[in-house]
Amino acid sequence: MKKNIELIKNELDIMNRAKDILEYSYKTCSIISIKDTYLNDELDKFEALTSRFARLSDILTQKIFRLIEYLEMESPGTVRDRINRAEKWGLIDKADDFFLIRELRNSIAHEFLPEAINQIYREVLKYTPVLFKVCDNVTLYIKRFF
């Protein structure tokens, strides 16, 4: 049991550190906002935002939701299963939003067309608060186990 508690604390710490650095990038890029052309410094800031967004979404789906499956004694499932269960457990409001976040995460990793980048930036700014809320929900949810 003590080993499990340490694992849970460690995973929550990783999630919260990723959330904190994403919050920093989100605030910075919200001030820059979406525009037709960016300075190189602004592009660097949006690159950091999208990378941090993708990282936190991965931490949630690949680490945290799996951890909660374990705590709930559920069989390990696919990413789709984990997202649907997260909705059932009240961690996310709408599974469809999180499916869009996963698609956005994939676009971040694989999109190279300059004309598509602005749409990615717009979507990341839109869905970043969803990730923040999920992190808060996870923290509250896990507290009920201890």
Image (cartoon, rainbow, N blue to C red):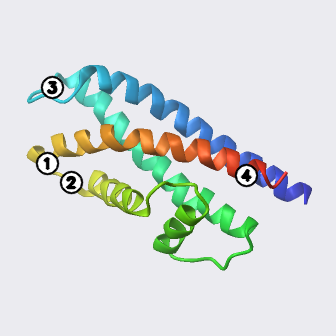
Query: What residue would you read off at disc 3?
Result: 38
Q: Which badge, 1 or 4, is on the more N-terminal residue?
A: 1
The residues tagged by marks 3 and 1 sit, at their Cα atoms, a distance apart of: 14 Å
The residue drawn where x is 90% and y is 60% is 1
Q: Secondary structure at mark 3?
A: loop
What residue does disc 2 label?
Answer: 111
Q: Which mark is residue 96?
A: none
Above or below, 107 relative to 29: below
Can residue 30 be seen from the camera position used here?
yes
- Cα gap from disc 3 to disc 4, whole angstroms: 41 Å
Q: Secondary structure at mark 1?
A: helix
Residue type at the position of mark 1: Ala
**Residue ID for mark 1:** 116
The answer to the question of whether label 1 and label 2 lie on touching residues, with beta carbons closer than 8 A, is: yes
> Which-is-in-front pick, marks 1 and 2?
1
Dot placed on the residue nearer the N-terminal end, 2 or 4: 2
For disc 4, the marked residue is 142
Q: Residues within 10 Å of mark 1 (few under 14, many from 20)?
A: few
Q: Nearer the viewer, mark 1 or mark 4?
A: 4
Quick one: label 3 or label 4, which is nearer the N terminus? 3
Q: Mark 4 Cα within 10 Å, few/some/many (few <14, many 20+)? A: some
Closer to the camera: disc 3 or disc 4? Answer: 4
Dot placed on the residue nearer the N-terminal end, 1 or 2: 2
Q: Amino acid at mark 4?
A: Ile
* Residue lying furthest bottom: 75
Please state which of the two labelled residues, at mark 2 or mark 4, is closer to the viewer. Answer: 4
Q: Earlier in the sequence, mark 3 or mark 2?
A: 3
Q: Position of residue 139 (x, y in %)?
A: 67, 45
Residue 52 seen in the figure: no
Horizontally, residue 63 falls left or right of residue 107, namely right
Cα gap from disc 3 to disc 2, whole angstroms:
18 Å
